[in-house]
Image (cartoon, grey):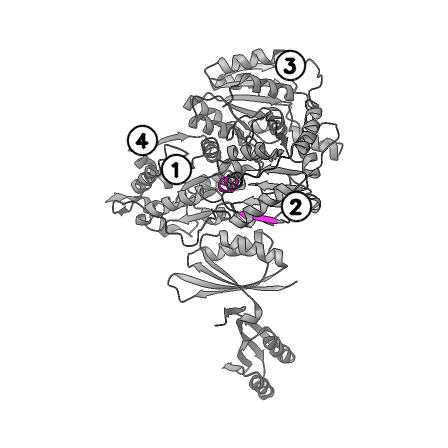
Amino acid sequence: MNQHLLSVLVNNHPGLLSKVSGLFSRRGFNIESLAVGVCEKPGCSRMTIVVNGDERVVDQVMKQLDKLIDVLEIERLPTEEAVQRELILVKVRADIRQRQDVIQIAEIFRARIVDVAALGLTLELTGTDDKLSALISLLEPYGIEQIMRTGLVAVRRF
Amino acid sequence: MITGAQAIVRALEAEQVTTVFGYPGAAIMPFYDALLDSSVKHVLTRHEQGAAHAASGYARSSGRTGVCIATSGPGATNLITGIATAYMDSIPLVAITGQVVSSLIGSDSFQEADITGACSPFTKHTYLVRRAEDLPRIVREAFYIASSGRQGPVLIDIPQDVQTAFCPVPGPAEPDLPGYRPALKPDVAALDQLADRLVQAKRPILCAGGGVISAGASDALRRLAEQLDLPVVTTLMGIGVLPAGHSHYLGTLGSHGVFAANYALHQADLVVLAGARVGNRAMGSAAEIARHAQIIHIDIDPAEIGKNITTDLAIVGDIHLALDGLLDRRIAIRHADWLAQVQTIRDDAEFDAFTESPSSVVHPPTLLHLIGEACPPDTILTTEVGQNQIWAANFFPVRQPRTFISSGGMGTMGYGLPAALGAKVAFPDRTVLAVSGDGSLQMSLQELGTIRQEKAAVKIVLLNNSRLGMVHEMQSLKYKRYSQVFLEENPDFEYLALAYGFGYACLSSNDQIRTAVDAMLADPRPYLLECIVSPQEPTLYPRKKGSA
């Protein structure tokens, strides 16, 4: 099953997100992630959607999305032509004895330490899926309290 | 300054709406008050679902956008089946609902329902109106969206305070829809290719769906078929594209279609799908057909291309333009031998179903055939869903587009009676028949009251077999026993007809058919013709079955 990257420009209307997500669920499309935020066009948002499926599925996803009147543009981003990033926040348990070890791992990954407490640390890391997954697996032995990922965001290269 | 409610009424007038179907309630009262000062006719149905179906019947018979109106909460949710039915069959509909006042939205207030959320799977678009000054543009956009591209329903939900708020007297409204660009002009190169393939093919066939009727392209399709001697089959939604009895017309496809149509589709080496979405009831074995034939798909909705069948060549755009483009190319070939071959099969199979039946019952195929002979060619026929629908589709001679009105995609029981009302309101001078079964008639029975109030002389042909005939037939074939299909304590339909001021007659044998039908047609009142049908009468006739 292949992953496909879609960049979708939408009208920033209330209810738009449910129209998009409803479309995916009722047509049985398998969605890996969806990230959305306001963009350079006033009144608009841009979504990055990662879809699992074969060519036929991604073709249908694009056509069905296009039928939504609040969807203004749909662009399929080939992986090699896209700058892709994802941000992760990881709350990892680390007491005073383990803290240095965790800080060392963070440094290797160039992760930022955004919160420190007696019980543990919160790390922030931006990167590709591979890099984020590697960090998570190295932190797992210390005990991960919570993970929050933004989902992939991507833009086409100049 | 005018109120939002007045702005809606003016916007409807600007769309040249003459008739709307609806049911009032608290949250839509400002609109109903403003409607009193308008020439727009309002038909008060007995249930909101009836309003949506009637608007759909009005739209399908006339080609104009149907309008239905309901209040918030239960009024709005009662519209849903009608909206979904219209969506599945791509019928242009604008549904207007009242909503609780803006400040109460989200508080679970009295008669509040998230109708825009609930309807988004079944509509082309929904609006929740926030400001009265947006109403003229939104109504303009709703009609534009509903009636253009692949047609369908649009919902406008209007909070009560938006209806009472003041706004400037609107000028002409323009749609502002950068995200809506319906495809229109078909690709010239693709049409050239199709023309070539029509020349090269040995056994080409045209398969027409409801899209041909919506596009007003039936005549163009007939001319193309006649020019090239192409056999034509239709889906249920395409019935009427060619008149019954046309030399090139083989009949309806599908599990309950006619043998010749399914046979020809399986023999073809080139299938031109025109405005047909390859639903599973019409083409259950789409993959198999695509293996032995080239599939050319003409559709206005790009999302239909490749959705249910693998396509060799796609032509996206208006079917009328596509067919005109093909006619303009003056393709110089005739497939007369192939046509003759399938015509023979059609003519041999014809009237297979017209067998002797016991004298105590009416034989539905014979009945529908004879009604067809007695009725004028512009007669509009609606059906319910079930056996009555299949008999009507296969045996009533439909002679014009937009005269066969049936819930094709959704298969909604209770559709036919209100749809017939809508058609009769659109065409008061034409004969409108509502073919129904005793099950489905009772799903919209309350609309008898609307028909009476409107003095709409709808002629109901009730095929009464005291059961849910289609489910009964399927249970008989599949399970060999019956579960919850018997309607043994049906009402006395004669009393029912009399209660609503309908004319009435009961038919229980074939030899009285013509007399009874003539009497029904001559009666100026709405009419209920109850026909006693054998519970064993099948829709799938025991013969070499074309599986499609």
Compared with B471, B307 (above or below) is below
The disc, 4 or 1, on the residue closer to the chain's N-terminal end is 1
The residue that disc 4 covers is B39
How far apart in space, not on screen, are marks 4 and 2 (Cα)?
53 Å
How far apart in space, not on screen, are marks 3 and 2 (Cα)?
45 Å
How far apart in space, not on screen, are marks 3 and 4 (Cα)?
47 Å
How far apart in space, not on screen, are marks 1 and 3 (Cα)?
47 Å
> Within the magenta stretch, is there residue B199?
no
The disc, 3 or 2, on the residue closer to the chain's N-terminal end is 2
> Which residue is farthest left?
B1
The residue carrying pointer 1 sits among few (fewer than 14), some (14 to 19) or many (20 or more) residues within 10 Å by Cα, namely some
Q: Which residues are magenta?
A: B313-326
Q: Circle 4 — which element?
A: loop
The disc, 2 or 1, on the residue closer to the chain's N-terminal end is 1
Tags 4 and 2 on a common chain: yes
How far apart in space, not on screen, are marks 2 and 1 (Cα)?
54 Å
The disc, 1 or 3, on the residue closer to the chain's N-terminal end is 1
Q: Chain of mark 3?
A: B
The residue that disc 1 covers is B25
Q: Nearer the viewer, residue B215 or A26?
A: B215
Tags 4 and 1 on a common chain: yes
